[in-house]
Amino acid sequence: MWTAKFKIRHDDCWLVPKTSKFNISAIGIPLNSYEKKGIKYHNGMCFLKGKKEDKLKFLASLKKDKTIKKFTIKGDQVFVLIEGDDNIANVFDASLFFIKPVVANKGYEYWELGSWERKSLTEFYDRVKNVAKIEILQLKKQTPAVFVQQAIPKLTEKQRKAIELAHEFGYYSYPRKISVEELAKKAKTPRTTFQEHLRKAEAKMMNLLIEPMAGI
């Protein structure tokens, strides 16, 4: 198995240019892409990192971005629905998989991808360089530890069950399909106890998402 780390700059992105303009960093994952009535759409999610005033300026700019059709904000977490072409999504190979969340900082994105074949990674590089600026920071043969694997062993059994139940019943969907109170009833656990297990699990997962920013 092979892994690669890429540094990518593409100014058509809803997020990357804003990291320079507003002096923030973001970490997240592309969610999905689809087409409806001949129009392409892309869902995305990220967590923001930076000074409060800079993050507020960034969030205010979303209202002026015509490519952003919908967005919702909860704390530092942002969900967006983007209309239009995404050049990177158009050339992405479904055989590749993300090892870590994508980091956006100072006008660049940092992607860490894995593949069974070295060729798939180098071909991805070749395709992207036709639509964006890209640099290979690392390319090597190894068995990767995907980012979710690093967090799961740190969860207690109750924390793991809480976050799995929340995911199963759409607590993390947009719009949210179930409340904490309803999840607690399904778990046959007092709401405050269930919420404590869920929040602790989320905090540990959040630490995993934020860690890749270190050193960028």
Image: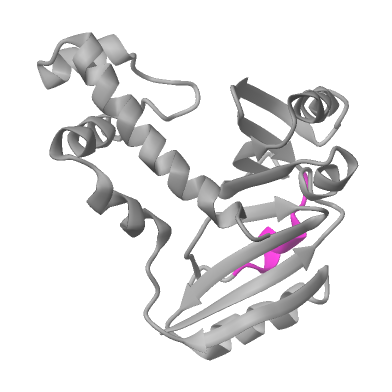
Judged left or right of residue 127, residue 34 is left
Where are the magenta residues, as a range?
84-92
Judge whether residue 85 is colored magenta. Answer: yes
* Residue 137 higher or lower than 75, as above or below: below
Query: In terms of depth relative to the viewer, which is nearer, 70 or 137?
Result: 137
Residue located 71% across and 52% down the image: 104
- Whether residue 67 appears in this view of the structure is yes
* Residue 89 higher or lower than 178, as above or below: below
Residue located 68% across and 59% down the image: 216
- Whether residue 33 appears in this view of the structure is no
Q: Position of residue 163 (x, y in %)?
A: 28, 34
Quadrant of res 4: bottom right
Q: Position of residue 143 (x, y in %)?
A: 37, 80
Judge whether residue 95 is colored magenta. Answer: no
Residue located 84% across and 26% down the image: 57
The color scheme shown is one colour
Quadrant of res 188: top left
* Residue 148 higher or lower than 114, as above or below: above
Query: In terms of depth relative to the viewer, which is nearer, 90 or 109?
Result: 109
Quadrant of res 196: top left
Residue located 47% across and 78% down the image: 115
Q: Position of residue 1 (x, y in %)?
A: 40, 84
* Residue 150 higher or lower than 186, as above or below: below
